[in-house]
Amino acid sequence: MARGLERHFGSGDDVVKAVDGVDLHVEPGEIFGFLGPNGAGKSTTVRMLTTLLRPTGGSARVAGFDVVHESDDVRRNIGVALQDAAIDPLMTGAELLQLQAVLYGLPKSRHRERAQELLERVGLTAAADRRVGTYSGGMRRRLDLALSLIHEPSVLFLDEPTTGLDPMSRISLWEEIRRLNNDGTTVLLTTQYLEEADQLAERIAIIDNGKIVRRGRPTELKAEVGSPTLFVAVPAEMHDTASTVLLQFGELRPSSEGTLGVGLSDGPGAVSVVIRRLDEAGVHVRNLELHEPSLDDVFAEATGHRLEGAGDGSQSETVAP
Amino acid sequence: MSVEAPLPLAPTHELNTVSPSIRVASFGLAKRNVRGIRRLPSAFLPSLVMPVFQAIAFSGSFFAITQIPGFPTDRSINWFMPLAILMGSGFAGVGIGLAAIRDIETGFYDRLRLTPAPRTSLITGPLLGALGRSFVVTTLVMTVGVLLGARWNHGVLSVVPLYVAGLGIAAAGTGWGLGLAYRFRDMRAAALMQLTLFIGLFLSEAQTPLYVMEGWLHTVARVNPFTNILRLARQGWVGEITWENTWGGVVALVVISTLTMWFARRGLDKLGD
Amino acid sequence: MTAALVTDPFPAPPDRPVLHTSNTAQTWAMSKRAILAMWRQPSLVIPSMVFPLFFIALGTSAFSRAINVPGFPEVDSYLDFALAGAVVQGVLFGSVTGATALATDVENGFFDRLLASPSTRSGIIVGRLAGGMAYGAFQTTFFMAVLLPFGLEIKGGPVGALALIASGTLLALAVGAIMSTMAIRTGSSEAVQGAFPLLFIALFFSSAFFPRATMSGFYATMADYNPISYLVEGMRDLVIGGLTVWALLRAILLPALMAVGGVALALRSLNKRLAAS
């Protein structure tokens, strides 16, 4: 639970407010999604909540403990898998799990057992004695997840867990997250993928430029946006004419280059009428798509631009190391 | 922006209340450190070979200084072997700093900081690794030195000040290396670490005793604590083991190590800023 | 970076040999690139400039009494004695930079691209070597200039000083050529950097810092067999002994011979690579 969390870098005129007054409340046992584009402040917020970074303003409590004053207690009860799998390439998977067990204070008798359990769980038993430097990207992520679970934390933080993964791995990771959640683990995951937030999260918060712009259940948020969006691709010179026509049907919505988007306030049935009117106005429609309200619409409505959801994920946010 | 009323968090898991002790965490980290060094031959071998080479090269090249009237020994290997050992130990300490930079750059250091291990153990663990390395280097170079003709003049006791000085320098190097690593967080610190160690050690009685020096070097070496440390290390091989030769070096080691350890600890705290 | 090197900017009229002009132009461009690369990386340049000077500074103060030890030639100060060793040290260390850069070129394929064009073929090597030579000359001059105010006295006079510069330049060429051969053969900048400690060792097991007459045992024997000893002594005699034929022979002829051998090796490995590609 965070209240008024703030984090800025630099000072005076150069102040960059990476996180500007963020309030969050996550219920125990839920999966909470933290959605936003690159550079929005997601990772910075996570770093503050996981005691890696000191907030410059505000406070936060995780698992019942204050992140600044009771940081040891927080660390004992959270598991964290950050954006880049943090591993030591010279160690084997088994050795890293062993080290984690030691550093989390697990009794020596439990070390091997727990390591075995986790290796099986993430499917790395065969590779356990190989150096992590030889692991593929997906394997590293899985090991990272195992490392974060060694002490059976009640809260799990996942920072962009599926960025850069192939679809198969993504789906199996989603399943794993659901399984963990069913066992009672509270999960806070950050993502730039709408589908991920939609599929996994019970409640979400949308962040842009360091501020939370929307929060709530995905279904509720989508319902608020209400009407479906019709996207039409028209030649540039016809844009103004087309806009005038479309405005008769609802408000214009942000869309990508070369297209116009309109919210159909009378529902999807209006599509045929729209096409006829555009035709009458002499507008040549190259392509058209009808979208039910999505989180992208929610985002667009809240921030004025679309979330580049399918980003390559290789851009990193400017976070202090 | 609404502010939610605080709700008591009902844990569905039992809360963990255990943190590892400093001792346990330190040993775990030391083990990892040693493994890492062994598995990186490009860092490991040179750290052993260079001190041996230095002992040989210096005592061979600068043999002439033993002919200077009043030189405390007639075996140049006796004079230069301790220097090589201290260089090797210092670089073992600095190597810890380098390893820390690598960890910070890969993000592994975040993992370590996320654990409930006491912050002190993040320093004492690798420190143990450095001390171990220093011990190995001292033993190796001493063996080679003896094979090349080094002779102690105080029996077995002669090796003690040498080990002590080596361990002390390794500790100081560790603190310095880690402190710089935490401040710079990238490889720029590496050059700085090595350069400062090098200069500190050489602007002292490294190559010749004080009484032979002239001018600026004499002035600098007189106040340089490394002169005391070298004197501590050399006694037993060059001259007698006396309290006079000992206390200066020990004080210097304790003070420098304390300062650099404090420097490192502060830097570690500031990593979260 | 001058990437547009493959096209000839000065197309010559048909009755003139085209190759000659473009070769020079390309070589000049390559040399400039090599020099600029060095200039832009002070962290690589500092060890080859600062360290030798640092050691001389140390030695002059520390070994001031050592110069009176039996076996030491007549000198006013260790400074005069040590200049030659410092120059050799600086040139040896500096040559690693150029070769490392060359190896990097090989590593990332830039080298093979240059091979494709006939006008740049020899230009690659010559350019690097020319860059190295320029740097060697600069180092020698710089050292002498910096140390003159501190009491350096070159008994060989201005001619001796010029001879020293020539010596440093030729040494840079020789070592640069040998290291370049290594760069082309191995194609790995790590391997080339690995040669650095070997050079270091070779330098120490010689009379670079102290006269051979003051050494003893097997160490003295090693120094006797090390060609670097004779090179350094030749250069040194120009400083402390004066302008003599014997000194000039060692200071100039030795590196010249090494240079010829080194360049031959380099060209051969270049041709081998060409034949292979």
Image: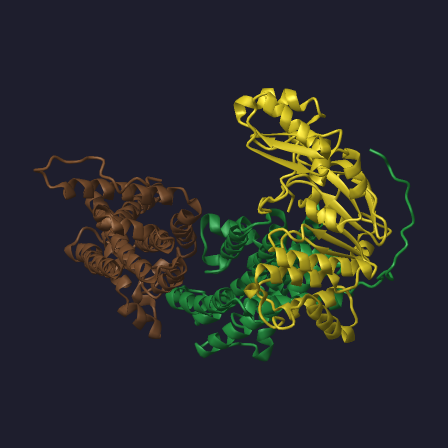
Chain colours: A yellow, B green, C brown
- How many tags in the picture? 0
Pick the residue in front: A278 or A37: A278
Which residue lies at the image location 49% right of the left edge and 56% below the top edge?
A: B202
Q: Is residue A226 left or right of residue A166?
A: right
Answer whether residue B164 is visible to the viewer in this image.
Answer: no
Asked if A310 appears above or below A267 in the picture, the reply is below
Name which quarter of the figure residue A38 lies in. Answer: top right
Q: The C terminus of chain C appears in which quarter of the rendering? A: bottom left
Q: List x then y, in percent, for residue A82.
A: 68, 53
Answer whether residue C119 is visible to the viewer in this image.
Answer: yes
Q: The N terminus of chain C appears in which quarter of the rendering? A: top left
The residue positioned farthest toward the left in the image shown = C15
Q: List x then y, in percent, for residue B9.
A: 89, 51
Pick the residue in front: A16 or B200: A16
Name which quarter of the figure residue A247 lies in. Answer: top right
Asked if B170 appears above or below C79 in the picture, the reply is below
Pick the residue in front: A260 or A48: A260
Q: Is residue A205 left or right of residue B73?
A: right
Q: List x then y, in percent, for residue A266.
A: 76, 29
Name which quarter of the figure residue A93 lies in. Answer: bottom right
Q: List x then y, in percent, for residue A59.
A: 82, 42
